[in-house]
Image (spheres, rainbow, N blue to C red):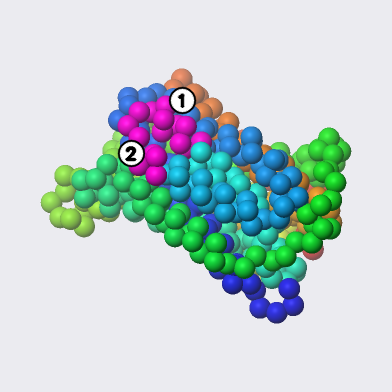
């Protein structure tokens, strides 16, 4: 595009804001589910597993369909699945059905993101892709920040946690209407009717395989950290795991998040802020350098949060870790896409498939936590961040 960004870019900002709330609120929903159904940490981690399993199963088929039919039908399908899954969760009252519907929501988010990430490249000038992808996913972080506050409001007002998902269903319905009314860029035969790529050949490419593993480790570390912050404060620092103080005297005190829930909100909120201000930082210092610095600082802050003796230091470490994760996903993702002139939809599918790390790592953290405690368990996402830092130092993706 030679002129101003397409108005569709603004609708995608809302789409990523919405799925950011839906995806990342699991960190404060999981303690509610543990309490309702008397689950172990490992069993509760199955919620995150179900959500991110969708990335592993659906991303490659979505990438193929993206290359064949273009993004519009897939973006609409993804949002429709998000809304339907949230609607069913809002009235479901047994754990297996909730897990199944969280999986359906995960399928919707997977389809939306796999089709949406490459679509962003066609909604503005090509040189703005890194910035726009980071900005768009920044809105995901802002949504993630707001989610715990909305849950705390409903719980403080005496409503069950499932009310949150009724709210999500309504927001998804509004988003679907806006997308139906939006104009998508045309994709000609060269973009939609090329032969299906050889995934075997793509996976033999060193950039694809190492950066897919980078996405796996990053998403696993991000979700494996955020999913257990509330329980970490409860079991390590003795802070109540309640999302809000329903017994407080004033209404304001009842609907504000507790310290652990606030830390989860600020973890995602600072991540969103980091993405929103990243344009100037990336322009000043360069994408590769920022990837190296931020991946190291994310690891260092997580280790501080895990090993600190005081809850205040742990809170500061988790929150700062969220900020320094802000550009890791988008730089690993966009650097990979930018390294190839063809098969971008298929490569996007592979990269989004690697988000299955978010399904694998949280239950592992829970399993280690059940046996050795959550302080030891948090070293699992720390190892994942270590790989991302190594990739930032040694990787060969194209940036500048």
- Where's residue 321, x and y in %? 52, 49
Q: Give the residue pinned by disc 2.
A: 91
- Disc 1 crowd, CA 10 A, few/some/many (<14, 14-19, 20+): some
- Where's residue 164, x and y in %? 35, 48
Question: What's the residue at 23%, 49% (across, down)?
Answer: 156
Give me the disc on residue 174. Answer: none
As helix, strand or loop, the secondary structure at mark 2 comes to helix
The segment highlighted magenta reads 87-103
Q: Give the residue pinned by disc 1.
A: 42
Question: Going by the image, does 19 lie left or right of 394?
Answer: left
Is most of the magenta stretch helix, strand or loop? Answer: helix
Question: Going by the image, does 129 lie left or right of 235?
Answer: right
Front position in the image: 314 or 26: 26
Say above or below: 229 vs 151. Answer: above
**Residue 247 sits in quarter:** top left
Q: Per the image, is 88 magenta? A: yes
As helix, strand or loop, the secondary structure at mark 1 comes to helix
């Amino acid at each position: 595009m030679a002129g101003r960004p397409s108005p569709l870019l603004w609708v995608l900002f809302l789409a990523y804001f919405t799925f950011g709330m839906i995806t990342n609120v699991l960190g404060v929903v999981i303690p509610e589910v543990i309490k309702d159904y008397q689950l172990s940490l490992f069993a509760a981690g199955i919620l995150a597993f179900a959500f991110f399993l969708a990335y592993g199963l659906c991303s490659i088929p979505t990438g193929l369909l993206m290359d064949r039919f273009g993004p519009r039908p897939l973006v609409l399908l993804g949002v429709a699945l998000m809304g339907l899954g949230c609607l069913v969760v809002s009235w479901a009252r047994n754990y297996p059905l909730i897990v199944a519907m969280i999986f359906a929501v995960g399928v919707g988010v997977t389809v939306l993101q796999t089709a949406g990430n490459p679509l962003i490249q066609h909604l503005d000038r090509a040189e703005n892709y890194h910035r726009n992808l980071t900005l768009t996913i920044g809105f995901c972080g802002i949504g993630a920040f707001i989610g715990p506050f909305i849950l705390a409001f409903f719980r403080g007002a005496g409503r069950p946690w499932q009310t949150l998902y009724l709210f999500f269903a309504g927001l998804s319905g509004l988003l679907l209407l806006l997308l139906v009314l939006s104009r998508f860029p045309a994709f000609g035969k060269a973009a939609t009717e090329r032969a299906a790529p050889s995934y075997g050949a793509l996976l033999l490419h060193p950039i694809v395989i190492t950066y897919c593993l980078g996405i796996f480790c990053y998403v696993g570390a991000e979700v494996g950290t955020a999913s257990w912050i509330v329980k970490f404060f409860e079991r390590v620092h003795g802070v109540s795991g309640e999302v809000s103080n329903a017994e407080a005297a004033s209404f304001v005190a009842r609907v504000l998040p507790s310290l652990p829930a606030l830390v989860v909100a600020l973890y995602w909120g600072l991540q969103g802020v980091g993405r929103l201000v990243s344009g100037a930082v990336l322009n000043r210092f360069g994408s590769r350098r920022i990837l190296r610095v931020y991946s190291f600082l994310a690891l260092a802050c997580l280790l501080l949060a895990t090993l600190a003796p005081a809850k205040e230091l742990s809170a500061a470490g988790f929150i700062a870790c969220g900020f320094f994760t802000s550009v890791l996903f988008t730089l690993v993702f966009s650097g990979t896409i930018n390294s190839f002139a063809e098969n971008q939809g298929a490569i996007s599918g592979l990269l989004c498939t690697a988000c299955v790390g978010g399904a694998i790592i949280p239950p592992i953290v829970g399993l280690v936590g059940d046996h050795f405690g959550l302080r030891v368990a948090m070293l699992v996402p720390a190892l994942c961040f270590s790989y991302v830092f190594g990739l930032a130092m040694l990787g060969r993706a194209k940036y500048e």
